[in-house]
Amino acid sequence: MRRVVVTGLGMVTPLGDGVETSWSRILSGQSGAGEITRFDASNSVARVVCEVPVGDGSNGTFNADRYMEPKDRRRVDDFIVYGIAAAQQAIEDAGWTNPQGEEAERSGVMIGSGIGGLPGIEESSVLMHERGPRRVSPHFIPGRLINLVSGQVSIRYGLKGPNHAVVTACSTGAHAIGDAARLIMLDDADVMVAGGAEAAICPVGVAGFAQAKALSTRYNDTPEKASRPWDEGRDGFVMGEGAGIVVLEELEHAKKRGAKIYGEIVGYGMSGDAYHVTAPAPDGDGAFRAMRAALKRAGMAPSDIDYINAHGTSTPLGDEIELGAVKRLFGDAVSQLSMSSTKSSIGHLLGAAGAVEAIFSMLAMQQNIAPPTLNLENPSPSCEGIDLVPLKAKERPIRAILSNSFGFGGTNASLIIKEFTE
Amino acid sequence: MSDTAERVKKIVVEHLGVEEAKVTENASFIDDLGADSLDTVELVMAFEEEFGVEIPDDAAEKIQTVKDAIDFIDANS
């Protein structure tokens, strides 16, 4: 099988625009949480979210004008805007902005989203209800479809290879990277732009998750405290938004053009819970089997993993179940690794989460520092015997990482990325 | 320039993101101003909003230039 490495990174997160901004703020323990500003949420039981800070681009704010013409931007939902922005960063970082001829035909895109253009669907539905079908924009459909991030990115950069989009709820970003890597391994492409994008913080989006009792509601007056994975006081996840995109490349292709290499995708495991639409299987079997499959694919032992970026959403059930699955699979090796949840800083980016977290994990590996789990002040009793990197980033050797993502429907994905060595 | 022409041109500039100088009366939305099939639908919707007219689909198909739009609006509003 051909080897696949990561040669470009891009992201938009609630901590700011760009990889460096987000990562430095993660390490310094900043939180992206705040009260909902996008709409009047006074009648909502859940009022804490992690919104992308929009501004003129100064101080790490996200200025969409850097990435799109205003006329193009207003036709599409924000998940597409974030996706295009993060893709541009990743493609420029990789130096793969203008492939020609066969190179273009061997370059593809696989960017997914968990939910897609929900804000626009909500707005257009209200508009149609009030004013009839002739007021619905001709850009309504192409501005909301999930695969239109992949479509838009391919058009912008002339990427004529496989054009695909993953939709697996909160596992989307991880599945996209894993599946895109396999396309390269199987020789369907040499370069893939892959990841996830999400922007579903709108009245019906928040209400839907709140009614499923998935969101934190106890910390409306102290938003920065709301996302607290494994802490006794956790009470649900905090919705985030943004995008994470990587450029994946066949190893020899990357070496030939002297690309910088962030890491090698060596393991990818998938499983289904076959249990419940929203609740994870209580025995953690799905998570366990996804991680085990990733280790098997990588040909690695549990003790080879130094850092786990957990799914860790801050829900009472999910955190405990994932922790149990990790302890069961890693056995004695659990005492040697560090595991944290960066969702404590940026909230849950849903379909973008797996991609953003894979990027954070690679940076952790490059710099030998594990990002912190914020607000882990009173760990649950089950947290004993494992380093969950409470409150502060921790320097330690990291040679290989595992990143978990689990989604509604019982869909699980684990990625293993290793330091590149010949 | 008539009031209708001013307002039509303003809409075209905004929706197509083109320079004002390019929006001459004889300019074709598709051939000269870079509009695609979706843009032309959106333009017609914007004209309907701005001028409070209804532009049926068969009439909309015939509106291909800035002047076509101005003439239709002047005749029907």
Image (tube, rainbow, N blue to C red):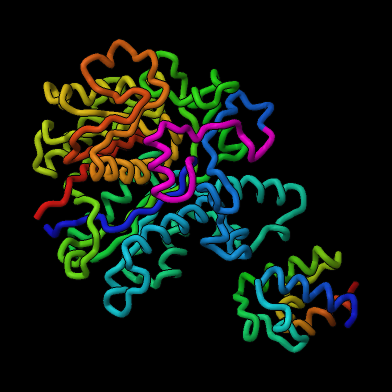
Quarter location, residue B70 = bottom right
Query: In this orientation, which residue lies closer to the viewer: B37 or A195?
Result: A195
- Where residue A377 sits: x, y (%)? 39, 16
Instruction: Give the position of the C terminus of chain A as an image quadrant.
Output: bottom left
Q: Is residue A354 above or below residue B61?
A: above
Measuring 15% from the left and 57% from the top, which residue is drawn there?
Answer: A3
Query: In this orientation, which residue lies closer to the viewer: A236 or A245?
Result: A245
Instruction: Give the position of the N terminus of chain A as an image quadrant.
Output: bottom left
Instruction: Verify whether residue A314 appears in magenta.
Output: no
Quarter location, residue A346 = top left
Q: Residue furthest bottom?
A: B26
Q: Is residue B53 above or below residue A354?
A: below
Asked whether residue A395 is in view, the answer is yes
Left or right side of A315 for B73: right
Q: How many marks?
A: 0
Asked whether residue A141 is in view, the answer is no
- Where residue B58 sits: x, y (%)? 74, 77
Measuring 12% from the left and 36% from the top, which residue is drawn there?
Answer: A304
Query: In this orientation, which residue lies closer to the viewer: B40 or A62?
Result: A62
- Where residue A257 sits: x, y (%)? 21, 70
Measuring 16% from the left and 40% from the top, which residue is drawn there?
Answer: A399
Left or right side of A238 for A374: left
Left or right side of A300 for A395: right
Q: Is residue A230 above or below residue A308?
A: above
Measuring 66% from the left and 51% from the top, which residue is drawn there?
Answer: A124
Left or right side of A50 for A128: right
- Where residue A92 sits: x, y (%)? 37, 63
Q: Residue furthest top?
A: A381
The residues colored magenta run A15-40
